Amino acid sequence: MGLKLHREVGQEVLCEETLRLVDDHEAGFVVEGARWHEDVAFFRRRFGPRMVHVHLTAPTDLRRQRFEGRESGGDFDEAEADEVESEVNALAGHADILFENSGETTDRLAALVDEIIGEEGSK
């Protein structure tokens, strides 16, 4: 579905729709799951330096293990090769922050988001 929407309506429209879900654009908020350069570019244009791109990374074997642990089934290699995932690794090279998402990272990620939003609030 993501690829169909990407092709038929484009990321600009999808990003605009995402913003409609945010009550207060002045408050800090998180958009999870950017897959295309257009996603990041849209939010950089809209929010300038307030936009912080945190890119989560994890080793392939760990991502495979997590994928196979889901009840949705499917094939990891097929999912990795899907066109929707084609730009994800390249996005890491343009991220403001790379976050290693291995092990128990929920608290560290939450602290990072709080820190970013806190810094934004002080600007």
Image (cartoon, helix red, strand yellow):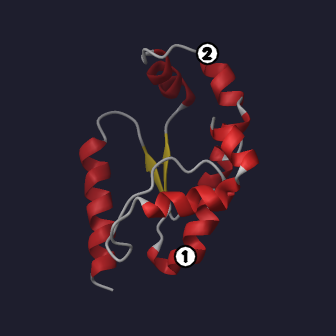
Tell me what residue is drawn at x 52 percent, y 33 percent. 59
Query: In which quadrant of the rendered image does the C terminus lie?
Result: bottom left
- Judged left or right of residue 21, residue 82 is right
Picture mark count: 2
Query: For residue 104, which quarter of the picture?
Result: top left
Q: Is label 2 in contact with label 1 (beta carbons under 8 Å)?
A: no
Q: Amino acid at mark 2?
A: Asp
Q: Alpha-carbon neighbours of circle 1 within 10 Å: few (<14), some, or many (≥20)?
A: few
Tell me what residue is drawn at x 67 percent, y 44 percent. 5
Secondary structure under tag 2 reads loop
Q: Where is residue 19? Give x, y as percent.
A: 47, 63
Q: Nearer the viewer, residue 58 or 30?
A: 30
Tell me what residue is drawn at x 70 percent, y 39 percent. 4
Query: In which quadrant of the rendered image does the N terminus lie?
Result: top right
Q: Is residue 7 above or below residue 13?
A: above
User: Which disc is residue 75 wearing?
Assistant: 2
Q: Is residue 84 above or below residue 18?
A: above
Please indicate, yes or no, whether residue 122 appears anywhere in the rendered image.
Answer: yes
Q: Where is residue 114? Give x, y as percent.
A: 26, 62
Query: For residue 76, which quarter of the picture?
Result: top right
Q: Amino acid at mark 1?
A: Arg
**Mark 2 vs mark 1: in front:** 1
Q: Is residue 37 above or below residue 82?
A: below
Closer to the chain start, of discs 2 and 1, is 1
Secondary structure under tag 1 reads helix
- Judged left or right of residue 41, residue 98 is left
Please indicate, yes or no, whether residue 95 appears anywhere in the rendered image.
Answer: no
Tell me what residue is drawn at x 40 percent, y 36 percent. 102
Q: CA distance from mark 2 to mark 1?
A: 36 Å
Q: Alpha-carbon neighbours of circle 2 within 10 Å: few (<14), some, or many (≥20)?
A: few
Q: Where is residue 11? Give x, y as percent.
A: 66, 56
User: Which disc is residue 46 wearing?
Assistant: 1
